[in-house]
Amino acid sequence: MRNCIRTAWLTVVLMFVTVATALANYPGTLDGGNLVLVDGGMGVGYYADRSSVQVEQYAPPKYQLAVNLVSVQFSDEYWRKHETYIGGPYTKGDSFTLKFRYNWDRKVISYQRGETWLDWDVNRDYCHAEGDPMIPFAAEVAFVSAYNMRFFNDKLGYSPVLKKYQRVIDEQLYFRLGI
């Protein structure tokens, strides 16, 4: 039983390492910095389009923004030769819009799924299996693009899997945003 638990725990930890490593294989930005990487896997990157950000509500401390995300398909052939997508050919695919509500005082966001607004919990491990890991990154890209300031900045969330606090947004995203 202990071996099963240890194996399961190691699998989860390796999944997090794999996701972090996988994003490192994608270009952080495209189109001169206008498209910013917020998620990726299996040769497809999802990029937030900074030029598409729309301010739908400005009533500090409450804000509502919309941003378009673009899927980008990268070359499998390039991957096989170089084990990275950086510098390789790509094709832009479909785009879709995400909407976010922000509360500056509480440093929390919610996002729209259909007609429903869902709170995004910073004290959870988000992976592709149980949610959209792109949510906080896309929300941060939208906020920085609209107001030229960080929303989450160095806010910490608790990881139940890793059993420690970690940044909601890592510094690499802010580097890609130039802030």
Image (tube, rainbow, N blue to C red):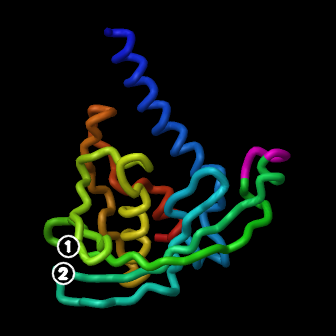
Q: Amino acid at mark 2?
A: Lys
Residue displayed at 58% across by 79% down: 34
Which amino acid, mark 1? Trp
In the picture provided, is 69 more to the left or to the right than 82?
left
Compared across the picture, whether 82 is left or right of 95 comes to right
Quadrant where the N terminus sits is: top left
Does residue 112 sit above or below 9 in this rendering? below
The numbered mark, 2 or 1, whose residue comes first in the sequence reads 2
- Nearest the viewer among 157 and 155 is 157
Residue 82 covered by magenta stretch: yes
Residue located farthest toward the front when viewing the structure as drawn? 114
Q: Nearer the viewer, residue 97 or 105?
A: 97
User: Measured along the vertical axis of the image, is residue 71 above or below residue 27?
Assistant: below
Count up the numbered dots.
2
Callout 2–callout 1 Cβ contact below 8 Å: yes
Magenta span of residues: 80-84
Q: Position of residue 18 (x, y in %)?
A: 54, 39
Which residue is denoted by mark 1 in the rendering? 104
Using the numbered discs, state the Cα–Cα distance from disc 2 to disc 1 in whole angstroms: 6 Å
Name the secondary structure under disc 2.
strand
Q: Position of residue 65 (x, y in %)?
A: 33, 82
Query: Residue 163: x percent and y percent?
Result: 27, 32
Asked whether 123 falls inside the magenta stretch, the response is no
Q: Residues within 10 Å of mark 2 (few under 14, many from 20)?
A: some
Question: In this image, 111 relative to 27: left or right?
Answer: left
In the image, residue 22 lies at what x, y percent? 59, 46
| Residue occupying the point 23% across, 48% down | 123
